[in-house]
Image (cartoon, grey):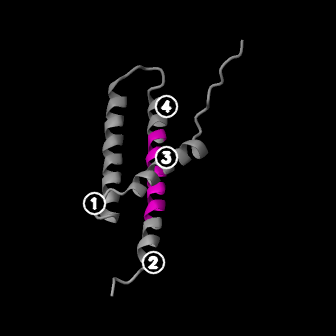
Amino acid sequence: MGAPISLITPIWEIVLFFLAVILGFVICGLYFLENRFLRRKYRRKIKFLPYFFGDVFYFLLVGGLISGYFLFFTLGEVRSYGILGIIAGIVLYYFILNKTPVRKEKRK
């Protein structure tokens, strides 16, 4: 006899995909929050260091979140639906919740 077929694994993979989408939302939200904060704080001053340290802190935080997701939930296996879920979350946040204005080109 073969191994019993279980529905727990496909359902768990669907749950992990939606967790990855939520993680993508959080990643993109943190990016826009960081940029909005730095723009308000250093509006017309051209300073390199605050942006540099903000970006370093952002990428360390995002790297930790993504590594934690893959280590904790998928036991260290980088699965394609996890990466696709993160990308889908970023794209959904950008097109649905992004509040930055889009500049329209002037017609001649």
Where does the C terminus fall, quadrant-wise? top right
| Quarter residue 13 falls in | bottom left
Q: CA distance from mark 4 to mark 3?
A: 23 Å
Q: Which numbered disc covers residue 76?
A: 1
Q: Which numbered disc covers residue 7?
A: 2
Marks 4 and 1: CB-CB under 8 Å? no
Q: Is residue 99 left or right of residue 52?
A: right
Mark 2 and mark 4 lie on one chain; the one further toward the N terminus is 2
Marks 2 and 3: CB-CB under 8 Å? no
Label 2 amino acid?
Leu
Q: CA distance from mark 4 to mark 1?
A: 39 Å
Q: Which residue is mark 4?
A: 40
Neighbour tally class for label 1: few under 14, some 14-19, many 20 plus, Cα within 10 Å: few
Residue 3 in the image, given as x and y percentages of width and height: 34, 82
Label 1 amino acid?
Gly
Q: Which residue is mark 3?
A: 90
Q: CA distance from mark 2 to mark 3?
A: 29 Å
Instruction: Specify whether residue 67 is painted magenta.
Output: no
Q: Report the predominant secondary structure element of the magenta stretch.
A: helix
Question: Marks 4 and 3: which is nearer the front?
Answer: 3
Q: Is residue 61 left or right of residue 14?
A: left
Frontmost residue, 42 versus 78: 78
Q: Which numbered disc covers residue 32?
A: none
